[in-house]
Image (spheres, rainbow, N blue to C red):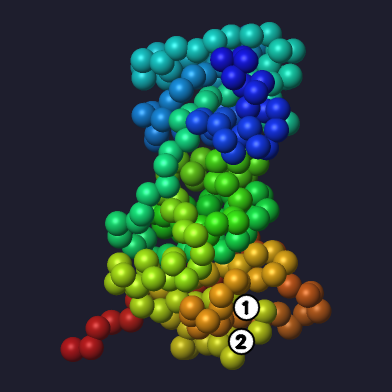
Amino acid sequence: MVKALRHFGASRHNQRKSPFFVVEGYRVCREALLRRPSWFSFCLLSESFSSSLEGEEMRGLLRRLGFSWGSISPGEFSGLALTEGSQGVMVAMERPVFGAPGELSPVCTLILDQVREPGNVGTLLRTAWAAGLTQVWLTAGSADPWNPKVIRSGMGAQFALETHLFPDLPSAGEAFRALGGKEIWCAMMEAPTTLFSPEFSPAGAALVLGNEGNGITCPQVGRPVTIPMPGHAESLNVAQAGTLLLFEALRRPSPSPAP
């Protein structure tokens, strides 16, 4: 276990190529074990955490699931930890294979188009989970959803959601329409339609958020929508923009079918 974790943490290349990913922190590890027990590979506890109340609860959960664990000194654990404040518990999980979506997510479909900052991707996954989505689509070039920083900012969202990867935005748009989706909205800096416009119909649609610096790679796949900003800020953080758009989709009911 220790040797595998040292190799995993040695470089980002090792993390991307590894057959497993690492979850740290009591709450996120608990979420992973409860929601995706079939992905479990191994667990490592620091001796100080193991003797704490949360450590006792974690060991009880591992026993109920039929899993074993290893214990090492706090100093050894600190040398393996990938994030600050990991609390003395880490779980290695088998990296899942990206599959094709079989249906559309409730509320709307969120597509992250080359969103590269791990903190933004993790926050958007957590926001999507909070808004009632069951999956998030990403295009190649986006941050790996199993990156330690993405997992930390997602706070367990990865284990509640399905994530699907597409080679580019046009292929994601084709998959969306093949599953019965119709409207695709691309968040842009400027557009005739705003978040508050009556013609903006996000419920049941796809919402596309683009790269932090370059925006959406292929905006012609859908219709542009913007978030009005009467102040003098140049732009919103992509995770902030995604939160506004997702909860507007949640707020607006789907249009009633014609009688």
CA neighbours of label 2 inside 10 A, class few (<14), some (14 to 19), many (20+): some
Viewed as shown, does residue 68 lie left or right of 73? left
Distance from the alpha carbon under mark 1 to that under mark 2: 6 Å
Viewed as shown, does residue 54 lie left or right of 86? left
- Type of amino acid under label 2: Ala
Quadrant for residue 76, please give it. Answer: top right
Quadrant for residue 212, please give it. Answer: bottom right
Residue matched to label 2: 191
Disc 2 secondary structure class = loop
CA neighbours of label 1 inside 10 A, class few (<14), some (14 to 19), many (20+): some
Residue matched to label 1: 188
Q: Residue furthest left?
A: 259
Numbered label attached to residue 198: none
Residue 171 visible at all: yes
Residue 196 visible at all: no
Query: Toward the viewer: 170 or 60?
Result: 170
- Counting from the top left corner in percent of width and height, residue 86 is at 66, 27
Disc 1 to disc 2: CB gap under 8 Å = yes
Looking at the rendering, in which quadrant would you find the C terminus?
bottom left
Residue drawn at the location 41% of the way across and 79% of the way down: 183
- Counting from the top left corner in percent of width and height, residue 130 is at 48, 54
